[in-house]
Image: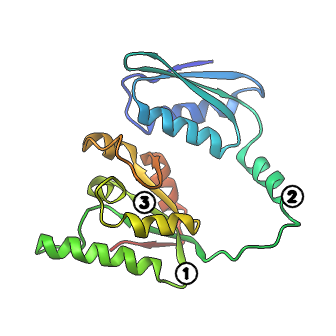
Amino acid sequence: MKIDARGKQCPLPVIEAKNALKDAPEGEIMEILVDNEIAVQNLLKMADHKGLTSSSTKTGDREYLVKIVAGASGEEALKKLEEETSLEPEKKDERRRGMVAVISADHMGEGDPVLGHLLLKGFLYALTQQEELPQTVLFYNGGAFLTTEGSESLEDLRFLEESGVEILTCGTCLNHYGLADKLAVGQVTNMYEIAERMTHASLIVKP
């Protein structure tokens, strides 16, 4: 099974691959052709999330081939993992399941931009001090600057990540601002996953 997703912006390559996997027999190898590294990362992440074997190869100057082997679902892989670790001491999870923080700019509020940057830096630090941490923090548009090299909030975001919080930054946004190779914390995501996280959230926090 082959999918030509060249010229298509995320999340289209991920959505097309995900839909095709629904009908693919176990063991079949799906080949997805894309023309940017962000799409490669998102496809590999989707496969990993589903517990599927995957690989990627650069086949040209701006051409990549991603292979995904249809097989066990993410739910089955997660169940197996839980069974294998059921005898281990339980680690306290300080995250609140279903709480998602959304950062869509590099400042907080409107008015003085210097104050806005200072407020958002303070907000991210305050987030690390809460009794219940968010399960996920989403960064898109100008928020992408917070997870990349030079950000003054990297220490706080790394603390959250080490505490088990998902730090996800929009890949299209990183590309748009020329930051694709400067991500310093967390992982790249796409708009499909951002929409999925937000629509399934029990609480959305947006400064």
Structural distance between the alpha carbons of marks 2 and 3: 30 Å
Q: Which residue lies at the image location 78% right of the left edge and 28% below the top edge?
A: 26
Q: Amino acid at mark 3?
A: Leu
Residue 199 point in image, percent of width and height: 50, 60
Residue 176 point in image, percent of width and height: 26, 41
Mark before the other along the chain sequence, 1 or 3:
1
| 77 lies above or below 21 | below
Q: How many neighbours does mark 2 have within 10 angstroms: few (below 14), some (14-19), or many (20 or more)? A: few
Q: What residue is pinned by disc 3? A: 138
Q: Which residue in the rendered view is the most extreme toward the top? A: 60
Structural distance between the alpha carbons of marks 1 and 3: 17 Å
Displayed quadrant of residue 115:
bottom left
| 144 lies above or below 12 | below
* Mark 2: secondary structure: helix
Residue 196 point in image, percent of width and height: 51, 54
Colour option used: rainbow
Front position in the image: 8 or 58: 58
Judge from the rendering whether residue 3 lies leftward or rightward of residue 118; answer left or right: right
Residue 33 point in image, percent of width and height: 49, 20
Q: What residue is pinned by disc 2? A: 83
Mark before the other along the chain sequence, 1 or 2:
2
Judge from the rendering whether residue 1 lies leftward or rightward of residue 63; answer left or right: right
Q: How many neighbours does mark 3 have within 10 angstroms: few (below 14), some (14-19), or many (20 or more)? A: many
* Mark 3: secondary structure: strand
Judge from the rendering whether residue 159 lies leftward or rightward of residue 55; answer left or right: left
* Mark 1: secondary structure: loop
In the picture, the quarter occupied by the N terminus is top right
Q: Amino acid at mark 1?
A: Glu
In the picture, the quarter occupied by the C terminus is bottom left
Q: Which residue lies at the image location 45% right of the left edge and 34% below the top edge?
A: 39
Q: Amino acid at mark 2?
A: Glu
Q: What residue is pinned by disc 1? A: 132
